[in-house]
Each structure stands twice: as C-alpha cells, then as structure tokens.
Image (spheres, grey):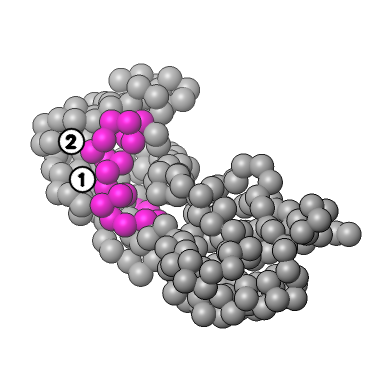
Amino acid sequence: MNLPHQLDRVITIAAPPATVFSFFTDNERWAAWWGPGSTIDPRPGGRVHIVHPNNVEVTGEVVSVSPPDSIVFTYGYTTGGAIAPGGSLVTIRLEPHNDGTRLHLTHAFDDSVQRDHHIQGWRFQLSLFSNAVLNVLHSGAEGTVDAWFGLWSQPEATVRAQTLARIASPDVRFQDRFSALAGVAEVDAHVTAAQRFMPGLVLRRRGSVRHCQGVVLADWEAVGSDGGSRGAGTNVFYFGADGRIVSATGFWNAP
C-alpha cells in the first residue's frame, strides 16, 4: 500500500497508559469516543467499525495491537466518505509522560486532499477521546471533592492526614483570597488554623460537580455552627494522572 501523505497529531492525557489503551480494546469505551454502535475486535485481523453521530460509517481492520503501547488499523468509509475500505492507515502510539500519557497519532493517505480533510476531524476526535478517558478516570470526582471540603471540619489530625494522602498529591497547591499554599503539610496547618479561628464552620458542596479534561468545578457553601451561611463560591480543581488533586483554587461569590 502506497500512502505517502500523512497527518500527525500529538496530545498529552493526564491518565496512565493502561487506562488510555483500554479505550482501544473495550467496545464500550471505544464507542464512548467514536459514537454509539462503534465496535472493535482488538486482535490482528479484527474488525474496526465506527459510527459517527451524522451516520457516516467507517470500517477497517486491526493490523497490529501491542498493549499498552500501540495499535494500527486500516480506515475507510462504507458511507459518506471518499476513502475506500482499507484505503488509509491509522497508527496510534502511547508513551509514559510526566503528566500521564503522550499519544502520537499518524494517519497515512494516498493523496493530500484527504489528508487535509481529516486534520480538523482528528483534532476534534482526539479531544473527545481525551475527555472520555478522563471521565472514566475521575468518575469518583464528587467523592474526592466532598472529602476535600470535609477536611475543614475534621478535628482529627490523623484522619486529615490520611484523607490528604488519599485525595491530594504531596505537593498539592491551594489558593483563594486567604491562601497561597504548597504541599499537604501547609494545607493541613491551614485547616488547623481555620478551625481555631472559625470554630464550627462547615464547607459543603452545592449541586453536582462539572468535569472537563481533568478540571473539576464544584460550588460550595460555608455554614456556621448556628446553621447560617458564612459565604459561598466555586472551587476549581485540577486532577492528576493518579486521580488525585494537584491544585485547587477557591473563588468566593461577591457579597
């Protein structure tokens, strides 16, 4: 097969390579980033089937698969496209990265027109892919956020330390109007001070969290020991590849 024209795209996803690769080998996860009805048989010679939301269908065949490093498959249209089945070749490679996984995609074509036509398509599709991976990785984000807010009313130092180790990276950063902190020790000391100067204060989440590409937004309310509101706002959490919080920024609502 002579495919002299190729497009290349590289993205970094804040997730472990094994988690990222599972979206090439599990039908439910494959469909999560391509569309309902999409399937893959992840073995050499296995069928690739992609159903785009506009009912354009792609078919292909797995050429090689090497978990959790690479997958290669052919790519062509059964409906709605100019590339015949088997007419192009997609290669995806994964490598570990400090921030999680670096994904390298190459799509090879027999002409430059089709290559150029697919540039925006892959830009869009890999964005969907990244968010699908991170939706799975951070499916427990609400619990993590609730545990973070719960620290502010947790009196037991041992429990706070265990919670921080579970939900936050060792060098976690936290900032708001009254905080510019780095590391779990500083966060814990800040919580201790808050309990001393604002006894009985409770932070609690309001509504569901919102997640996109490893960033989580969570609305909160501060409630005093008398049950009255002491303030409200929104926190922005950044999550790392291990599922823990790497930074949090608190925004207070205008009085």
**Image marks 2 and 1: residues in contact by CB distance under 8 Å:** yes
Q: Amino acid at mark 1?
A: Ile
The nearer-to-camera label among 2 and 1 is 2
To which quarter of the image does residue 45 belong?
top left
Which range of residues does the magenta coloring cover? Answer: 8-31
User: Along the line of sight, which residue is nearer the eye, 167 or 73?
Assistant: 167
Question: With respect to residue 247, does 120 lie above or below?
Answer: above
First-in-chain label (2 vs 1):
2
Query: Which circle marks residue 71 in the picture?
Result: 1
Residue at 73 percent across and 69 percent down: it is 199
User: Along the line of sight, which residue is nearer the eye, 144 or 13?
Assistant: 144
| Real-space Cα separation, disc 2 to disc 1, in angstroms | 9 Å
Q: Amino acid at mark 2?
A: Pro
Q: Is residue 99 visible?
A: yes
Residue at 32 percent across and 31 percent down: it is 28
Percent x, y for residue 70?
20, 50
Q: Circle 2: is it few (<14), some (14-19), or many (20+) Cα within 10 Å?
A: many
Percent x, y for residue 90?
26, 43
**Residue annotated with mark 2:** 42
Q: Helix, strand, or loop for circle 1?
A: strand
Assign the N terminus to one quadrant of the image.
Answer: top left
Task: Please indicate whether residue 23 sits to the left or right of residue 201 in the image.
Answer: left
Q: Is residue 206 magenta?
A: no
